[in-house]
Amino acid sequence: MHPGAQDGDSDSNIPGHPRLRLSCATLEPTFEVEAIDEQGQRMLTRIAGEHPLTLYVDRREIVTLMTLGRAPEALAIGYLRNQRLVRSIAEIESVQVDWDVNAVAVTTHAGIDDLERRMSHRTVTTGCGQGTVFGDLMAEIDSIHLPDEVRLSQAGLAALLEAVRQHETVYKSAGAVHGCALASVRDEQCALLAFVEDVGRHNAVDAIAGQMWLQGWDGADKIFYTTGRLTSEMVIKAAQMQIPFLVSRSGLTQMGYQTAQRVGMTMLGRAVNRHFLLFTGEHRFVHSPLAPA
């Protein structure tokens, strides 16, 4: 077994999917190494893990992902979801990770129709490392209709940013990773549901997408938070998950902005502490003066 791996099968605690066979092969996210500081002193410090994980679907090699290894099963499921290779978690029979060979094997119930053709057209995106989206990047964007009923208050956003700031993260101890969070919105307030870190922001997004399927979470009343920049890829993935709010502590690209306008998403960037910039989807955001910190 790979050092630090926690292996085993878990067939329970998957809402609505009791037949799904799922390994549990989480790796330790950081490693201790020796370094020399600016004073010439030797010291022990922690660095982030990075492991290749080759994804196979029905014995067909799909892609090799470089990952922290914290949520490999959710990452595999979310990757297939966001690449639009599977339409429902009900199509998946099992997800088994084996760190001895750095592979994850996904078995479907009925195979994936026209897999070769659908893999032939790849768009290289601006994701950390190399993000790819199979098929036409914008093919289904106009068919997406995000919910308009949910509202987020300025105080709710501030509470979310504070919850993310206080969350214990790999980044605080080792750096070198991106983080993504999923929160629910109710009565203009929000609650943190999940937080995932990985060496690439697109991996962290996919792992959240996989967790949403595994937990049976609907995106209609959710906020997606990322530490990475808001590109068209990030907007499309959030929109495919039916999430109306996208928040980042970083900035955004022109195509990310245009795509958010196109799908009617509420997108906020440069969101740190109580500061933010609201770029699109103002109708879902409730401005409210905050009390002095």
Image (cartoon, helix red, strand yellow):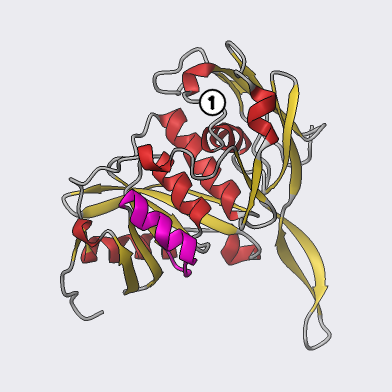
Where is residue 277? Give x, y as percent.
34, 72
- The residue range painted magenta reads 248-264
Q: Nearer the viewer, residue 274 or 252?
A: 252
Q: Quadrant of residue 83?
A: top right
Q: Which residue type does callout 1 highlight?
A: Val
Residue 269 quadrant:
bottom left
Q: Residues within 10 Å of mark 1 (few under 14, many from 20)?
A: some
Marks counted in the figure total 1
In the shown orientation, is residue 148 left or right of residue 18?
left
Residue pictured at 51% horizontal, 35% vertical: 210
Drawn side of residue 206 relative to residue 240, left or right: right
Residue in front for this viewpoint, 15 or 145? 145
Q: Is residue 211 above or below residue 33?
A: above
**In this view, 130 is above or below 21:** below
Q: Is residue 285 magenta?
A: no
For this view, does 126 lie left or right of residue 281? Answer: right
Residue 52 at x, y = what percent? 76, 43
Question: Could you tell me which quadrant the C terminus lies in?
Answer: bottom left
Q: Residue at x 29, y 66 (%)?
A: 158
Give the structural element (helix, strand or loop) at label 1.
loop
Residue at left offset 42%, top offset 40%:
240
Residue 98 seen in render = no
Q: Position of residue 263 (x, y in %)?
A: 35, 49
Residue that label 1 marks: 86
Q: Identify whether 86 is placed above or below 220.
A: above
- The residue nearer to you, when weighing 176 against 174, is 176
For the N terminus, the quadrant is: top right
